[in-house]
Image: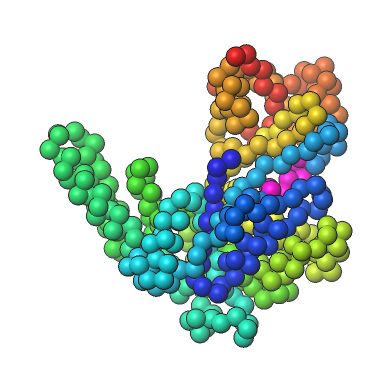
Amino acid sequence: MGMRIGIIGLPNVGKSTVFNALTKMQVPAANYPFCTIEPNQGIVLVPDRRLERIAEVSKPEILTGDTIEFVDIAGLVAGASRGEGLGNKFLAHIREMDALVHVVRLFEDGDVINPLGSIDPLRDIDIIDTELMLADLQAIEKRRERTTRMLKTGEARYKEELELLDAYQAELEAGIPLRRTDLEPIYELPLLSSKPIMYVANVEEGSQELHPALVVRAEEEGAEVIAVSAAFEMELSQLEPEEAELFLADAGMEKPALHRLVEAGLRLLDLITFYTIKGKETRSWIIPRGTLAPQAAGRIHTDMERGFIRAEVVPWDVLIEQGSHAACREKGLLQIEGRDYVVQDGDVILFRFNV
């Protein structure tokens, strides 16, 4: 679907362990694999109980869940904006992401060196935020040179852009990441500190305890924070589904913490899911909230968007309750919607189109 979430953090905080657990983990239904594309990129199937319930009604030969891409980005060190460590490469990868998962270390382990010597999640967050903001200031200065040259055209939009760049700079110089402001974006200027973010606290195995200061920081930003024991989740990801369920039960957990991470990623990007039942296949599709029916059809195939006629829509829970599309149609529960229909989370849709 093209949505990419980058996993970032300082060295030795557990980013790669979280990534490996995500991309190798299987959801409880054994026919939902997670697959690795490249060493640092993985496609993760979105766990979806609704899809399983719909399948109980549709009884498909093929059941396909939608996916989201996670990217394990190299560890950052102070000075990255000046090229330290992997520096520019790290920052270039972040520019390509739609959102970020910032892994912070809350575990003690003598076998895993802590380069900074102590557990301090706010210090770790501030180091990365500082590098992102310094990189943004550099990008703003380059943009300012271009915008200033264009002022001589007399077009008002360049004066407005310059004022916006000044506002960006003022916030960044005050130490405020742009994601914490309400300044409008310049879409062709992808600033790193403006990207939506969530925090993953890599905790001791058997613990769900979060550092109070991390909780406060997340609340200040309106960000989610999830406790994950990366070592536990990695071990869980290597098990067969039946063994994994027993392992979870012994740990007193209903589902892997990484399922919550994927679900939080969808909320972070403000994505919703709709479903289709067509022939032998039942499938879920992820789209941005607010998508109109023709564009949702285009998510399946461009011809469907181009030749869109109408959408026949039923909420997933109504379909489950009635037992079939036919029953929904007979009882007048199937909605006929046109081009201006905004797709809702959980819609089961049959698209009518003609090319």
**In this view of the protein, can residue 290 be seen by the observer?**
yes
Residue 346: give x, y in percent of width and height: 69, 36
Q: Nearer the viewer, residue 274 or 243?
A: 243
Residue 318: give x, y in percent of width and height: 78, 31
Magenta extent: 45-51
Residue 237, magenta (yes or no)? no
Q: Is residue 86 above or below residue 344?
A: below
Q: Nearer the viewer, residue 27 or 355?
A: 355
Q: Quadrant of the C terminus?
A: top right
Which residue is drawn at the image coordinates 68% and 48% (left, top)?
Answer: 46
Q: Is residue 242 above or below residue 105?
A: above
Spot the residue most to the front.
38
Left or right, 351 with reference to 128 = right
Rendered image coloring scheme: rainbow
Q: Is residue 84 above or below residue 319?
A: below
Residue 50, magenta (yes or no)? yes
Number of numbered tags placed on the structure image: 0
Left or right, 268 with reference to 322 = left
Q: Nearer the viewer, residue 158 or 328?
A: 158
Which residue is drawn at the image coordinates 83% and 20% (left, top)?
Answer: 326
Residue 55: give x, y in percent of width and height: 82, 36
Q: Quadrant of the N terminus?
A: top right
Which residue is drawn at the image coordinates 42% and 53% (left, top)?
Answer: 95
Which residue is drawn at the image coordinates 15% and 34% (left, top)?
Answer: 153
